[in-house]
Image (cartoon, rainbow, N blue to C red):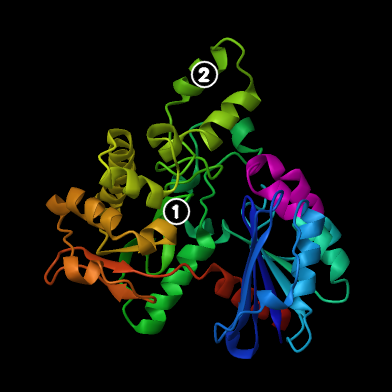
Amino acid sequence: MNILVINPGSSSIKFSMYGDGLHLLYEGELSGVGGEAELEFRDAAHVDLASRMGEVRAATVEEAIATVERAVSLEGLPQAEAVGYRVVHPGPRLCGHQRVTPEVMEELRAGKPFAPLHDPEAVQIIEETMVRFPSVPHFACFDTVFHETMPEEAKVYALPPEVRAEGVRRYGFHGLSCESIVTQMREAGVLPARMAIAHLGSGSSVTACVDGKSVDTTMGLTPTGGVVMGTRSGDLDPGVIFYLLRREGATVDSVEQMVNHDAGLKGLGGVNDMRALRELIAKGDPRARFAVRVFCRSVARALAGFVALDGVEAVVFTGGIGEHDAATREEVAELLGGLGMAMDTAANRVESSGLRRVSAEGARIAAWVAPAEEDRMIARHVAKMLMV
């Protein structure tokens, strides 16, 4: 069974094909959706396939999906027999990953307010892809499902019952990433009983796991809360929102724009890309240095809470920053030094792929680095649902 996985971002669409045994057959990323498109496309042996595509366009979602369809339909490539999508939020009524039906699509459309940054585009992509691949089954895999194991006291907001009845609670996100980390560590035989996963990237969250199951996480109702992120504020005193709404000319939309797109690392340091911030720090930029310090402290504070509450024995860093920025890992570890976290500097600075341990010998809290294999997890879930 060949499973096409589509993982939409804010201005990009990642796609990959998995064959029997969840072997990667090819993968690509169409970036610049809504503007000037660029395509990276290669097979499992890293042979370039994008050169066979000619001009690519992605000024609209329709054009972007047409480009993806053309890419995966190139002569000689295995064709899709099922399609799985990463969807951030299922809304308040869907539980578990789902085969896409008219009823599921109705729930996804109704649930857009729960993830306004992500779900509207995901719904549009699903609709368009189903038109182009009408004869194969389609499945939605949600970032929240991994966190369904959290106890009720970790999910609830202290709000009146009529609000909670509307589905206002803590859902948690980056679940497919977290599940992929648990899977990699279990397959390697190194899964600790109690660990925390620091998914650090443009969106960032920290999750506590016991026996491979989520028991708490930093994100809540939406992917805006929790630790500081690339352009998102993370947790705020609710009074800050009231203050912002009372400013002259403020609207709900303008405040939402601020906390989701103009805050975080961007609001503090001027840019939201960690690589750019590191370059500015090397040039002596104080704003960039301060932004990174705030980011690392917010991550360390979340981890410290889970260490104290859940007895974390190991921390796994993943995501674009977590996997690739050794300096961030070192800064977070230094902040947690009093709790027993220490890095093996040489191991931490080695650039390599795959799961690896980077903590110092004898450190009370082990530190690991692993890739976020969200697409592989989606393919795994689709394969399971196809067997039902």
For residue 159, above or below residue 203: above
Q: Quadrant of residue 249?
A: top right
In percent of width and height, residue 92 lies at 66, 47
Question: On the image, numbered disc 2 is attached to which residue?
Answer: 244
Magenta stretch: includes residue 317: no
Question: On the image, numbered disc 1 is attached to which residue?
Answer: 201
Residue 100: in sight, yes or no? no
| Residue lying at the far top of the rendered structure | 248
Element at label 1: loop
Q: Give the mark nearest the N terminus, 2 or 1.
A: 1
Residue in the image at 62% along x and 32% along y: 163
Magenta stretch: includes residue 120: yes
Write down the region rendered in magenta: 105-124
User: Which of the numbered marks, if any, corresponds to residue 247?
Assistant: none
**Main structural element of the magenta stretch: helix, strand or loop?**
helix
The quarter in which the C terminus is drawn is bottom right
Residue in the image at 51% along x and 57% along y: 174
For residue 91, above or below residue 240: below
Residue type at mark 2? Leu
In percent of width and height, residue 335 lies at 19, 48
Q: Residues within 10 Å of mark 2 (few under 14, many from 20)?
A: some
Q: From the viewer's perspective, is the residue at label 2 or at label 1 nearer?
A: 1
For residue 130, above or below residue 152: below
In percent of width and height, residue 128 lies at 83, 59
Q: CA distance from mark 2 to mark 1?
A: 26 Å
Residue type at mark 1? Gly
**Taking 357 as reference, is 256 left or right?**
right
The quarter in which the N terminus is drawn is bottom right
Q: Quadrant of residue 68?
A: bottom right
